[in-house]
Image (tube, coloured by chain):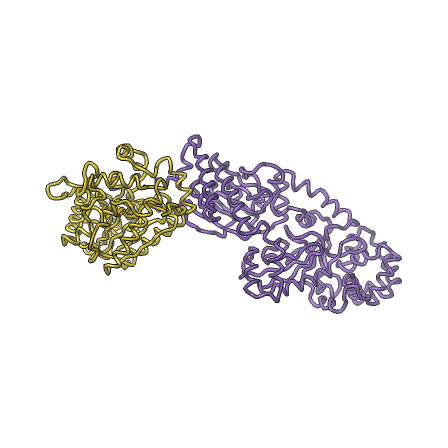
Amino acid sequence: MKELAGRLTALDPDAGAAVRVIAYFDRLAESRAGVEALVRGAAVLAGCPARLVDPERRVHVRVEADGTRRDTEAPPDPAWPSAALSPGGAGMLWLERGGPGGLPATAQDTRSDPAEPVAPSVVEAVILERAAGAVRLVLDRTRGRAPADDPALVETLLDATAPEQARLHAARRLGLDPAAPARALAPLNGRPRVIPADAETAPLAGRTAVEAPVRPQTGPTSQAAAPRPAAVHGTASSETAAATAAQPRPVRAGGTAPARTAEPAGPAAQAAPGLRTGAGTHPVTEQAAPRPRTGPTAGPASAATGLRPAPPGPGLPAGRLGVGPAVPVLELPRSWAEARTALRFTAEGTPQDPGPQVVHAEELGGIALLAGLVAPGSEPPPDVRALEAAAANAPWLPATLDAVASTGSLRAAAAGINVHHSTLQDRLTHAEHLLGWPLRTPQGRLRLQLALAMRRLARP
Amino acid sequence: MTHVPPPFDPELAAALELIKDMISPGLTPDEIAEVRQGPGIQMLADLDLTMGGAFEVEDRQVPGPEGEPDISLLICRPAATESAGPRPVIYHVHGGGMVIGNNRVGVDVPLEWAKALDAVVVSVEYRLAPEHPHPAPVEDVYAGLLWTADHAAEIGADPERIVIAGASAGGGLSAALALLTRDRKGPQPIGQVLMCPMLDDRNDTPSTYQMAGLGVWDRTANETGWTALLGSRRGGPDVPAYAAPARAEDLTGLPPAFLDVGSAETFRDEVVAYASRIWQAGGVAELHVWPGGFHGFDGFAPQAAVSQAARGAQLAWLRRLLGA
C-alpha cells in the first residue's frame, strides 16, 4: 500500500479513481487540513508537482510528487493544467505536468503564440477541481476572504499610536510580509488600503504617462476605452491580450485560461484576475490612446511637480486616489499621511476639474509643501481666484490650461484637447488677458502650474 | 474510561480513504491465508531493491536454528566499491503481525537509511505463525543475526556496528532479539530501531480499546496475531519475554533504543510503556509519539508531513548513533 496514493493516476479512471480523489479531499477538508496538505494531496494523487499561487494573499506553495515541499521562483507554465481558486480570482492551482521541461513562457509568448495546453485526464481534472475548492475554503478561513478589505486591521496598521506588535500582527493577518515594504492608498471614495510595494502593477519608471481615464473631451481615448468590458469578457485571446497589457509582471497568475478545465467556462470564470471591476481601464487606455499625454515635461518646474497621472494597477480603487510611498510596514502611518496629501493633488479628470486621478506621493517632490500652505476650504490664493473667475467666463479654460501645463509643447497640448494649434494660441491670448499673467514663458507656466495645484488643494 | 479515539492526522485520514479497500482494521484467523495472497502484500514487496542501482542484491540461504531448516537472508550491499572500511549493518526484521509478509516487506525503509549512511542491509526471512508458533520466528531471527555477525567480513560489514530494526511485528521481534542476544551473550547490536512495535500479547491497554475498528491493525487483528504466535497461552501468565517483550522483567543492559508510534493506534500505550521501562531500568531510549498517526502511517502514507517528520527522526537518530 506504500505509494498506493502515488499510483492512483495510473489506475483506470473507470475503476473509481475519481471517487477516491473526491473522498481524499473530502476527508482532508473535514479534518481541516492546511493549504500545504491540500497541495500535497494534489501532487501525490496526480504524480507530479503541484503549485498554489495566490498573489493577492501572498500564498505560494509548491509540493513535489513525493510530498516534499519545494517552492520555486520560476513562473508557472501556462500550458500546465490549472484551476482558478475562484471565478475571476487571481489564485491558481497548477499541476506541473506535460510540456518539454515546463519552460516558462513570457507574457509576450502567451499573447502571440500560446503554449499548447496539455489536456488533463479525467482524474487530473477532478484533482484540480476538488483541491482548488478545498484550498479556497481554507484560505477564506485562515487568510480572510478579502485580506485588504478588513477595515479594522488596516486601521490598526495605519495607526501610529497602535503598539508595534499589534501593527505587525495586523500586517500578517492582511497577508503582508512584515519584512517587505508596503504602501498605503488613499481613495477619495472608500476605505484606506494597504498593498505590498511590489504589488504595484503600474510601474512608474520608464513609463509614458497616460490620460486619466474619464476625459470626455478627449474623444479618441474615451472611445478606445469604451469597448473594454466586451474585450475583457469576450474571447480568450482578447482577454489574454488585455491581461498582458494589464500585468507586465512575470507572474500573470493565470491570465491564460485555455487549460482551466475544472472551472465552468462562463465569462466570469475566464476573466483575467487583474481585470475585475474595471481595474483594467488604464492599461487598456494606455495601449489604445493615440496621443498619450506626456506628463510634466513642460517648463523647468514640471519635472518636480509629479502631477502626471499614473494609472492604478489591477485591484486598485477606481476614482481619485493618492498613493503613499513604499515604506517598511511599521512606517505605514507615514505612507498613509503622504497618500492623503497626494490625494489632494488629484482631480476628477473632468473638463471643469482636469488633471490626474492618481497621484503618487513619491513624485510630488517640493510641490507637496504647498499642501501645508493651502488648507482645504480656505480662502484661495489670488492666482486661484483669478483662475476661478476666468473659468466662469470661459468654460473651456480649465481643461485648456491643464493641457498646457502638463504637456511638453503647445502643439502636443492642442492635440491632447483636440483643437487646432491656432485655436489654442487664440485661447491662450484670451486666458492671459483674463488671468493677468503670461502663460507662454517658463515663469508663467510655473505660475500656472502652481495655481492649478493650489486650486485642487483649496477645494473643500 | 472513555473510548473516544484521538483524531487521525488530516493527511493520514485522507490516505486511509485510499487504502481502506485493501487494508481493513481487523483481521481474523480465517482471513490470514487470503491476506497472504492479497494485493496489499504484493505491493509492499514490489520494490526496486537496488534503489536505482545503488545496491547489489542477493538472497543467501544460511543455517537456521539448531535442528531447524535453513533461513533466507536478503543482503543489500552498496554498489559503490570505495568505502572507508567495513560498513555498518542494518539488520531488518519485517512486519506482518507474525502471520504475513516476507523479507521484502518494508525493506525500502532501511534501504533509504543505508543509502544515506553507506550501510549494508540484511533482511531476514522467518517462519510465520500460526504454522510456526513461538519460538520459531524469533529463533529464525536470532539465527540470521548470528550468521550476519559471523560472516560480516564476507559482506563488507562491521560486526561491531549492527543495528537491529523492524516495524510492527518486526519491531516486536527486534525488541525480543535484543533481549535474547543479551541473555545468550550473542552478537551485541549497537542500537535497536523499534517502529510501531508489537510488544504486548495481553492486548488490553487503553489504546487497544480506543482504536477498535479503526485505522490499521486493531485489537481484533492483534488478538489474531498473538493467538497465532502463542495459541492458548496468549494473555496468560506464562508468556515468555522473547515472545512478547512487554513481559520482560529486566530491561537493563539493552542497546540504545529508538521507538516511535502513532497516537491513534493500538500499540500506542504499550510502546510508551516500554520506553518508560527502559528509562526506569537506566537505559537509553528515544521515543516519538506522532500525533494522529495510525499503525504504520509513515509506510502507508510516506508523503504526509507527519510521515516525513517521522522518517526524518529515524534517520537523524541513526546518524547520531553511527556518527555518520
At 56% from the left and 62% from the top, the residue drawn is A166
Return the residue found at the far left: B67
Q: Is residue B59 visible?
A: no
Residue A113 figure quarter: top right
The answer to whether A82 is drawn above or below residue A201 in the figure is above
Q: Is residue B61 visible?
A: yes
The answer to whether A190 is drawn above or below residue A325 in the figure is above
**In x, y percent, where is residue A30?**
47, 43
Question: Chain B drawn in what color?
Answer: yellow
The answer to whether B278 is drawn above or below residue B211 in the figure is below
Return the residue found at the far front: B1
**In x, y percent, where is residue A29?**
48, 44
Closest to the observer, A77 or A169 = A169
**In x, y percent, where is residue A275?**
64, 46
Looking at the figure, which quarter contains the C terminus of chain A?
A: bottom right
At 67% from the left and 64% from the top, the residue drawn is A338
Q: Which chain corresponds to the colour purple?
A: A
